[in-house]
Image: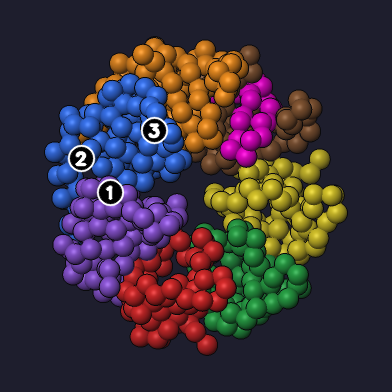
Chain colours: A orange, B brown, C yellow, D green, E red, F purple, G blue
């Protein structure tokens, strides 16, 4: 198997902004400060992105991995 | 991996107010008194935050982790 | 970790009335007689609390933990 | 922990009528003939209880535990 | 615990017609040819039972256990 | 237990057309090239069967087992 | 069992475009850079395919396996 690249991608994203899409349909953007193999994430300066593009500040959060569809470093 | 920061964030939040968003769409706010690696939480002086911003007192509660989307220390 | 407090809270609630909120949207109130680490609960003199505040008697029940959102000792 | 009482309750209910509420919203009533730690149940002379209170005979059934919300000995 | 009776019931049903109710709301009837502890089932000459009582032939099938609500030997 | 028959059924179906019903309500038909104990399947020349009976080509696919309701060799 | 073929199919697809269908109803297309046994995937130059056929760029992403229905190398 070869998911080490994914870990490397997450490792390189530490301290940078990432986008997380959740099963609930929400998206969250924030600075990645930590993660584990269950895709639990620690974010800082995070905000929820609403359907109309507006954002709602969440600050520091821990996201439980089983809600996550995908994570992407912001381009 | 590097989620130790998340544990530290939770550890620092003990005795302080946190906000928990649940899969059901509800949000709960209360004083964090305990947690474990499944994101089960013990809260005191907790209250449910309704859609219209009003709150409903819950008091001391144990929240089962598999309902949790995210937890945040109140800013 | 530090969820021992939650266990202590449950331990102290043995023989007392607790409120359990379920994923189905229902709430159940009864005397807590037992529990385990999966949040399976044994209740006596339990009753379901309907949306309009009326109650429906259930008597002695075992609640399967994976239905539970939260448990609270009655104030 | 202290769920032994729940096992005792189930053990005492063997050969007696129990009521099982399922996540699907259905309820089933029957004579409890067996169970295990996953809350899989073997019932005999079982029947489904429909919303309008009528019943539909199911006979001998094995119910898979992950569908179960709660089980109660009939009063 | 005492679910051996359930295994015996399934063992006795081998080669006989059983009814399986699925979480999707469907029901399937067929000759039980095999099963395991996850409630995966091998059926032959199976058919889906539609809401209006009509049936649709499925032939030989393996049913994945996590879809199963209950299984019953046909009366 | 006795699900070896199911494995034999799958083994005999290698290289032959099978029908897979998914929890999403979709059905997929294709040539079975591999499987494992989680009911993950490798299919070739697969196609999705739409509600109106038309088909949409998918080619070679790996289906994740937890989406599967049942698998059947085509009659 | 014989899913080695699926692993070979994924291995051969490394560096090539794959199509992933998700439980949410979405489809994602991108260059496969990594995967593991849970069907977590690392994609680059990925894009979401909307219902009307238009696409929305996602870039580099890690997809959590429990959202995946199927993966297919693009024909």
**Residue D48 to residue E73: above or below:** above
Q: Which residue carries the number 1 mark?
A: F57
Q: Which corner quadrant of the image does residue D57 belong to?
A: bottom right
Q: From which residue to which does the magenta span run?
A: B10-31
Comes first in the chain, label 3 or label 2: 3
Q: Which corner quadrant of the image does residue E62 belong to?
A: bottom left
Label 2 element class: loop
Label 3 element class: loop
Q: Position of residue G50 (x, y in %)?
A: 42, 32
**Residue C27 to residue F73: above or below:** above
Q: Which residue carries the number 3 mark?
A: G53
Q: Position of residue A11 (x, y in %)?
A: 31, 19
As measured in the structure, the alpha-carbon distance from the residue carrying label 3 to the one carrying label 2 is: 17 Å
Seen from the viewer's position, the closer of residues G69 and A4 is: G69
Image quarter of the N terminus of chain A: top left
Instruction: Name the side, left or right, on which B2 lies relative to E26.
Output: left
On the same chain, marks 3 and 1? The answer is no
Q: Residues at badges 3 and 2 in contact (C-beta under 8 Å)?
A: no
On the same chain, marks 1 and 2? The answer is no
> Residue at 37% across / 37% down in the picture?
G27
Whether residue D45 is visible to the viewer of this picture, yes or no, is yes
Q: Which residue carries the number 2 mark?
A: G75
Instruction: Examine the structure image and report whether residue B21 is included in the region drawn in magenta.
Output: yes
Label 1 element class: strand
Q: Residues at badges 1 and 2 in contact (C-beta under 8 Å)?
A: yes
> Residue at 31% across / 26% down in the picture?
G46
Q: Chain of mark 2?
A: G
Instruction: Examine the structure image and report whether residue A50 is included in the region drawn in magenta.
Output: no
> Residue at 27% across / 73% down in the picture?
F75
Decide: few, some or many residues near mark 2? Use Cα within 10 Å; few <14, some 14-19, many ≥20. few
């Amino acid at each position: 198997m070869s998911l080490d690249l994914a870990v490397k991608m997450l490792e390189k994203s530490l301290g940078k902004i990432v986008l997380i899409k959740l099963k609930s349909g929400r998206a969250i953007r924030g600075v990645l400060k930590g993660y584990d193999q269950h895709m639990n994430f620690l974010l800082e300066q995070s905000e929820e992105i609403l359907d109309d593009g507006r954002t709602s500040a969440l600050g520091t959060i821990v996201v439980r991995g089983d809600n996550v569809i995908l994570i992407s470093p912001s381009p």
